[in-house]
Structure formats: C-alpha cells, structure tokens
Amino acid sequence: MNRLDQFFAKKQKAFIPYLTAGYPSIDETVGLMHLLVDNGSDILELGFPFSDPTADGPTIQDASQVALDNGFRRTDYFDIVKKFRESDTETPIVCFTYYNPIFKMGCDEFAKTVAELGVDALLVVDLPFEEQDELLPSLEANGLYLIELIAPTTPLDRKAEIVKNGKGFIYQISLKGVTGARAEIAENAAEQAQETKSLTDLPVCMGFGVSTKEQAAKVAAASDGVVVGSAIIKAIAYTDGQRMSEKELDDLASFVKELADATHG
C-alpha cells in the first residue's frame, strides 16, 4: 500500500511542509527532513530545484536558485531521498517538481528511480490535466501517485473530471497567483475545499499562503490537511557558506511544531 494511503487511513489531519532539496545546502537537507518529522510533520513535500519555477513566488524561487548555485544536480535529489529513507521508511514523500526534469530524464526512468528510492507521489505543478497521459503509465507501473491540483478558478465540471484521476489526496490551491506566505488566506478557502470534497472520497489538502498557526487551524478545520511552503523556507536561516546554528534549528523546530499542533488540533 502506498504510504499516503496508509497515513490517511488513520483519519487524521495531515500537516505537509515543503522543503527545497539542496536548500540551504545539500548536506543539510536530510537533517531538515528529519527535523520536520520529529516536530509533527506527517507528509513531506520535497521540491526539485528548477531554473524556471513559474508557479512559485520569490521565496521558493530564491531557494531553488541557491540550491542550483551550490551545484545541485539531479542525482543529489536522489541521494537525499535515499539517505532519508535509511532511517525513516514510513513518512510519505511527495516530489514537487516541474515537468522539464522528468521529460529530460524520461518518464519511465524518472519514475522508476524515485519509486525505488522511496518517493510515494509526484506533484507536477506545470503539467495540465489534459497532458498527463505521457506520464501516468510510468507512474502507475511503479506504484507512484500523481497529486492532482485544483485551482480556485477551476469550474465545477472541470473539478469533477480532475478528481476522477486523483490518487493519494487532492491539492486544493487556496488562492490565485504563485506560492508565497500571505497575511490572510482567501476568504472563500473553506468553501473551495468543501466543494472539492463533495466531488471525491479522497482527502483534500489545502496550500498556498498559509504562514501562521491561526491560518493552519482555519484551513485544517475545512480540509483534510495543510500544506505550508514559503513560510517554512523563510524560517530556514540561510547564510552563504555557513551551516544553520543550533539556535536557528531550534527556532525552526518550534515554528514547525506550532503549525503542526494547530493542524492536528
């Protein structure tokens, strides 16, 4: 059974933080993944650094660029997942990526590689619903899920078509625009989640813009899980050439636990 199914079978709310692989450095990423899990994270969304992250706001764009400037290569992503799985075989991992890295390597080879290393699903942010046929057979052959995205502007009939292909969970985007922490989440976020939930038996998790424990609690009340990306990246202290200090790691752990507790509460 896919790890995502195993988690959601518990009927618990999911706290899903995002990390950019290779940020603040390649060596530190595995430790940060464990820190997130140790402080209440249920599913990890691990971003694949890409030079043209068109769906991401400046925070995650900058993190991707730092990783690439530090010499990040495709094999580094695979090594990070492999090292994490040496001591954590249970936490689901969603590979957040753009389609270009998959296309460059080849759908079959990419899917086979990440599946063997312990990835559970892909979230391909720039792959339209109508263009998924090239990738889906490779994922299905390797037991991987494709996380379907629902935008706040998606019409009801299109939502119904998209969720039919859903596996693992449905990702409900809470607001228009790119990723990024916001002072407020969309006023109709709860309505969006409820409408999507009415169309599927899959869990519906919501992200884009969540940055405080109050927002996390509000989103969790209306959905099955909370995705936090830019706020986590902002909380990672980055100084060129220097590792995070113990205090910086403690501060990050406290912030993650606060968000996780709000989601689970």
Image (cartoon, rainbow, N blue to C red):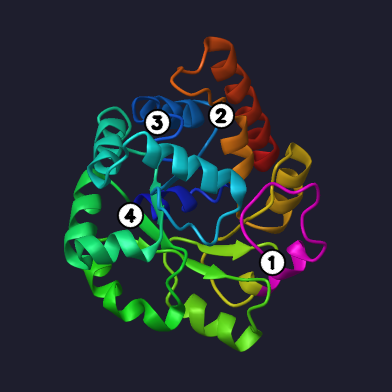
Q: Which residue is at a point 23% across and 66% down the rendered structure image?
A: 107
The circle on residue 236 is 2
- Dividing the image into 4 quarters, which one contains the N terminus? bottom left
The span from disc 4 to disc 3 (Cα, nearest Å) is 24 Å
Q: Secondary structure at mark 1?
A: loop
The span from disc 2 to disc 3 (Cα, nearest Å) is 11 Å
Image location (x, y in percent) of residue 217? 74, 44
The span from disc 1 to disc 3 (Cα, nearest Å) is 29 Å
Residue 202 included in the magenta stretch of the image: no
Residue wearing tag 4: 2
Q: In terms of sequence position, does the residue under pointer 4 or pointer 3 come before the other?
A: 4
Is residue 142 rendered to the left or right of residue 98? Answer: left
Q: In terms of sequence position, does the residue under pointer 4 or pointer 1 come before the other?
A: 4
Q: In terms of sequence position, does the residue under pointer 4 or pointer 2 come before the other?
A: 4
Is residue 30 rendered to the left or right of residue 86? Answer: right
Is residue 24 rendered to the left or right of residue 133? Answer: right
Q: In the rendered structure, which segment of residues is drawn in magenta?
A: 176-195
Residue wearing tag 3: 29
